[in-house]
Image (cartoon, grey):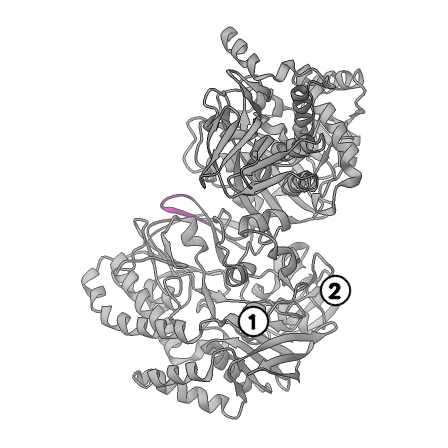
Amino acid sequence: MPDQITLVVNGSPVLVPSGTSVAAAIAIAGHACRTSVAGEPRGPLCGMGICFECRVTINGTPHRRACQVFGETGMDVRTEE
Amino acid sequence: MQQQFDVLVVGGGPAGIAAAVRAAECGARVGIVDDNATLGGQIWRGDSAQASEAVEWRGKLQASGVTPLCGTRVFHQPRPGVLLAEHDEELRVLHYRSLILATGARERFLPFPGWTLPNVMGAGGLQAMVKAGLPIRGKRVVVAGTGPLLLAVAAYLRKNGAEIPMICEQASLNSLARFAVTLLGQPQKIKQALQLKKEVGGVSLATSSWPLAAHGKKAVDSVTISRRGKSATIACDYLACGFHLVPNIELPLLLGCQIRGGYVQVDNLQQTSVRGVFCAGEPTSIGGVESSLVEGQIAGLVAGGRTEEARKLFGARERARRFASLLDQTFRLRAELRKLPSPETLVCRCEDVSYARLQKHVGWRAAKLQTRCGMGPCQGRICGPATQFFFKWNPDSVRPPVFPVRVENLGAFAGQPDPQETAISGGHE
Amino acid sequence: MSKVTYDVVIVGCGIVGAACAIEFARRGMHVAVVDREVVGGGATAAGMGHIVVMDDSDAQFALTRYSQQLWQQLTPDLPNDVEYEQCGTIWVAADEEEMNEVHRKHDYYRNRGVLTEILDPARLMELEPNLRDGFAGGLLVPEDGVLYPPCAARFLMERAQERGAKLKTGVSVVQIGPGQVRLSDGLEIRAGIVVNATGAAAPELSPSVDIKKRKGHLVITDRYPGFLRHQLVELGYLKSAHAISSDSVAFNVQPRRTGQILIGSSRQYGADSDEVDNNILTRMLRRAQEYMPALGSLSAIRAWTGFRAATPDKLPLIGPAPGDKTQHLAAGHEGLGITTSLGTARILADHITGSQPQIPIEPYLPSRAVKEYAHA
């Protein structure tokens, strides 16, 4: 298993240690995860997969909970900002 | 994909692991299901997975032959004896003879102005994020809310290089002192407490204290807290705020288990009101690791057919339950917290519903129908406990799916053929 | 509520009860409304919230069209949370037989001034790219719409309250008698007219009423803006609504303004439990995916059930209850309650006040049911 992985967040590569969640990678890249119904930026709240604030599109599939997914090299992550 | 088990355990935290191990030792074919990528639940996560107790139990699990089903979310029971779950994008059909629900607990969130800002998270929430790679070294974190989790989180963050300007605990100094004194009767707990003291020593612990507002533009940059009537504003990079725990009773509710006072009712063998369904750990009452381990073992032994051995653990459970009751008393929410939200403070984050909009409704159902509070993907897991505390509203029935699931999987299990099945005429059969 | 005598007491504050409340109130009548739960609960809360013209019978068409026009007049006043969208309906034809039905409907509607457009397969796919390939075409009815019913019911009730109507929720009616209702809290309300607008529960208060519960299931997804633009219905829907005794499912999806997709539909008689029935749910979702395979990968966040109020001839009961001149019915709307609520209220109020209703009330009079039964 490689020590570092590179995922792509909103088109830009982000290098993180392996074992980093997508939610943490998004935070490292300086993004919020989604925009709320009323237009607020939102990031992870519960860290355990039940609040759904960390929903992002991963490899084309929307509404994935970023805190429950570990980053993989080449993963394409799009936030809804 | 269909799998058969004698005993199926839902939830891979301490209660679930203990249940699975004991059931397997009885010779049962056991499976353990958890949404997370690895077992351990919330408490035995990341580097805490290296704590000796965690290592010991996970070792037992590995040796036991239990089938782990990680990254797997149970979402429906189409009929007794079968649970449907989703793994990656695929359906898992899990058949069982006995079911042990060890679904754990989640943090209780109470809305206050600014709580929706990025980098305001639960206390356990921030800890989980750090364990999953969020850098915290050199960052300032205010920890607030209530419960033993606050100290544990503060200690953990500090160990990982964070600066903790303050811990704001809403319980009074008296409550905490009583808690501490009662712990004197439990050597194991004293050891834990002393260890904690070492790790948190030097951090300012404010009692009778709670957050008034989080401030910031794109993320939180400071928080105003109340401390015995006076307010103070503290600059911070993160606010880790949670108000103790609420049990995850959604799956028990879906299965028809009797609930009392918000917890799953179980007899002394950890059996629920539904035949063949057991419940152990936090869903029966918030008691922490020890309670979970004891209850899990009892459930596993009974499900595995060794009821007499289970009875030997009744004493340990009794002791653990006393701690649970103490926790409950010590960290009870004080009435002032009902004033935390301002009228514009959002209570439902999925649908952005403010406190003011909710306040005018007579109950949960009216509020839900009129504002859509609780209708988002979290299905009231975040806003429900808050509305219960603010308005004394009771949540309504749980419906499948217990967790969001792909439409194709929700409709994938035909089960027994329906004798009344009538093909719709037209077109393409 | 004090011991005042009202002109009308309406039992049930779903969409029909609420529509009746504003209709009577705006004619200057003193109105009381009672609901055992909340405003806009019941089938109003459970259903899809469409406003559609239907042509099962001339009487059904008359009521749906009249009522749709009343909704159109109301749309400028509807608040945001009613989420009214004139998204239109597309009736999807799977084969030549259903395409013939498309042509029949097109002619029927055209002769009655309802705008429709026949869609060939290419045009159908252009309008709804997530439908599978291979359909024979469809019929677009652009004036149809959708809204969010619980808020619509609340809006109508608030309008009635602005004109002095009184509302009591969380209290049930234990007895209906001539000119009075008795509530579960002991209160007795006297009124010249009592309207039973309790939907599938109508027989509880008026035992002679032939209304049966017809259970339905729905599923809602997370937000996928742009996935679906129109309400889509399979033409087999009609065949399902026709069948009196069997359990059936049919493809019926609806876009919400939120971007969520509502997936239906199912119909069952004799199912009294409100629990989600896995077999029906599975059949319904499979049917939906047959029409729109891309639905399969959407995230479903909740499934639920509701009870429509069904009558033997599929027309609602509007008017005096047989045998009791003071009691009126406004119930039995099956899957068209939202659509026909405004029209129901209007013709009922006209009938009671002696005005000429804009469409004949005869087909909906409860007294007709006795005749229908005799011929069956």
Quadrant in the picture for residue A5:
bottom right
Callout 1 secondary element: loop
Height in image: B399 above or below C93? below
**Residue C65, horizontal then vertical, whole percent:** 73, 23
Residue furthest out toward the top: C375
User: What chain letter is assigned to the residue under label 2?
Assistant: A
Query: Would residue B88 appear left or right of C346 to someone viewing this image?
Result: left
> Quick one: label 2, few (<14), some, or many (20+) residues within 10 Å?
some
Task: From the viewer's perspective, tell me whether residue C224 is left or right of residue B250.
Answer: right
Residue that badge 1 annotates: B122
Q: Nearer the viewer, mark 1 or mark 2?
A: 1
The residue located at (53%, 18%) in the rendering is C312
Classed neighbour count for the residue bearing mark 1: other residues with Cα under 10 Å, few (<14), some (14–19), many (≥20):
many
- Tell me the distance, in whole angstroms, between the alpha carbons under discs 1 and 2: 26 Å
Q: Which residues are magenta?
A: B78-84
Query: Label 2 amino acid?
Result: Asn
Q: Is residue C287 above or below residue B408?
A: above
Residue at x 31% of width, y 71% of height: B321
Amino acid at pointer 1 = Gly
Q: Position of residue C81 (x, y in %)?
A: 70, 47
SS at badge 2: loop
- Of residues B257 and C319, the one nearer the viewer is C319
Query: What residue sits right under mark 2 in the picture?
Result: A10
Instruction: Say which quarter of the image contains residue C363.
Output: top right
Q: Is residue C314 above or below residue C11?
A: above
Asked if labels 2 and 1 touch by Cβ distance under 8 angstroms, the answer is: no
